[in-house]
Image (cartoon, rainbow, N blue to C red):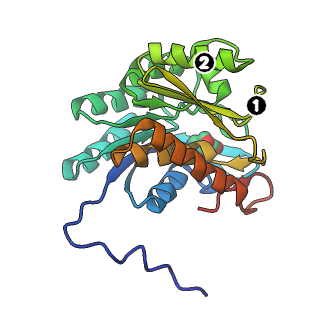
Amino acid sequence: MKKAVSIILKGRNEGETVVKVMSIAGSDSFSGAGIQADLKTFRLFGVYGFTVITSVTSQNTRAVKDIFNIPPDIVASQIEAILEDSRVSGVKIGMIGDELSTDVIGEKIENHGLINIVLDPVIFSHSGTIFLQKKHLSKVKKELIPLSDIVTPNISEAEILTGRKISDLKGAKDAALAICEMGADSVLIKGGHANYGKIDLLLTGGDFHEFDNEDVATLPVHGTGCILSSAIVCGIASGENTFDSCRNAIDFVHDSIKNALKIGSDQRIAPI
Ligand code: PXL
């Protein structure tokens, strides 16, 4: 049995400030995605992570078996319990579960003046199960996108959010502009499976930036969207700008994909 890595626990002086962020997301029993992936990412970035569980999913690398959404008042009380005792420098929002939890999350962000909000608008699981119903979508658009510093859809999520088909880079740029018009400060459209080349497209401060993923194999790896948005919140909560946070987060996800592990029988899992 190998010894646990103790270096992480050393070198923290008493009183040293630790960056603290909150993940509001679903639980993935297989620990490849969701709140488990978020917490592991926070740890690797040296950031302390609080968790607000919105839904419990029973899943493995093949399929989602069951979904139990946490009642919105319990989502609210998890957020309150954390904020009663600590400040947070950033919030990542993933799978939301109950439609009414969207109201709760929006209210808490506004009432507590929370900053550095990263919204991963999770609509499907990796295996294609619907996590967010159509009727719920307008709430996410109206209540959460305007509070977001950055929204990180993949192409199909960007298509659903904007109601437009994305078939080329120009289409992705138009969708990013449309999501900014809904009130987000920045948008990162993940293009890992894009037919216009594997380009992640960032719109921030009115400028477009393209991140090329051409050298990254398209292995199906579970939870990369969760890891990406968690890594971004670590960056911006630590005071980095949006571009640098995205650049570092994308590099981190590339390393995760290249080194992914075969834990279950189907999709691979990031080695974090
Ligand atoms: O990757 C999207 C995602 C988010 N949250 C949970 C998930 C998944 C994918 O399966 O299980 C809980």
Q: Give the side of residue 108 with respect to residue 235, left or right.
A: left
In the structure shown, which secondary structural element does the residue marked by tag 1 occupy? loop
Mark drawn on residue 173: 2
Residue 127 in sight in this render: yes
Question: Measured along the vertical axis of the image, is residue 42 above or below residue 239?
Answer: below
Q: Give the side of residue 185 with respect to residue 31, left or right.
A: left
The CB of the residue at mark 1 lies under 8 Å from ligand 1: no
Mark 2 neighbour class, 10 Å CA radius: few under 14, some 14 to 19, many 20 or more: some
Amino acid at dot 1:
Gly
Q: Residue 267's x, y, as percent?
A: 76, 51
Which quarter of the rendering shows the C terminus?
bottom right
Mark drawn on residue 242: none
Q: Residue 238's x, y, as percent?
A: 34, 49
Mark drawn on residue 197: 1
Q: Residue 97's x, y, as percent?
A: 51, 35
Amino acid at dot 2:
Lys
- Contact (CB < 8 A) between labels 2 and 1? no
Q: Quadrant of ligand 1?
A: top right
Give whichever of discs 2 and 1 has the lower sequence position. 2
Question: Measured along the vertical axis of the image, is residue 75 above or below residue 163?
Answer: below
Q: Residue at x 35, y 37 (%)?
A: 116
Residue 52 in sight in this render: no
Q: Residue 71's x, y, as percent?
A: 42, 37
Q: Give the side of residue 62 with respect to residue 91, left or right.
A: right
Q: Residue at x 36, y 32 (%)?
A: 105
Q: Give the side of residue 137 with respect to residue 200, left or right.
A: left
Quadrant of residue 162 in the image? Answer: top right
Q: Please count the marks in the image.
A: 2
